[in-house]
Image (tube, grey):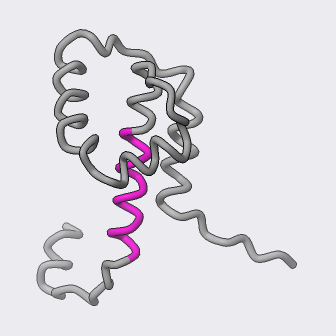
Amino acid sequence: QTCALPISALERLRILRNLSAHSVSFDHSKSPVRDHVAELRRHITGRRSYQWTKAAYFADEPLQPIEEMQCLMLTLCVLLEVIRGKVRPTPGNKKALTISTK
């Protein structure tokens, strides 16, 4: 009997990104998408993780808008997975947990 390993958050996001890469469409040149992309770009492109992701997956050629979006999202996925790996779950506050389930 084979035990399936759990899929990491990063791998799930990669799967979703790959599935939606060719079927989700929006005009990246019109607001509000343009504004959201600009904000993402402003926060992410200066990070070493973005530069590493770009070099590792997108070579040294200039990125097309969809490739830039993929690179931004993949960088976010990597950062989130690193954070998730470093967070230690706690049992939580019983009173707060009870309230949150109502």
Residue 71 placement (x, y as % from top left)? 43, 38
Residue, x 58% and y 45% (percent of image)? 15
| Image quarter of the N terminus | bottom right
Q: Is residue 26 magenta?
A: no
Residue, x 50% and y 26% (percent of image)? 61
Q: State the predominant SS element of the stretch in magenta.
A: helix
Q: Which residues are magenta?
A: 72-85
Looking at this view, is 74 or 96 the one in front?
74
Looking at this view, is 29 or 17 the one in front?
29
Looking at this view, is 21 or 58 the one in front?
58
Residue 82 placement (x, y as % from top left)? 38, 68
Residue, x 46% and y 47% (percent of image)? 53
* Horizontal side, residue 14 vs residue 4: left or right: left
Answer above or below: position of 89 versus 16.
below
Looking at this view, is 19 or 42 the one in front?
42
* Horizontal side, residue 65 vs residue 13: left or right: left
Residue 50 placement (x, y as % from top left)? 36, 47
Residue, x 51% and y 38% (percent of image)? 17
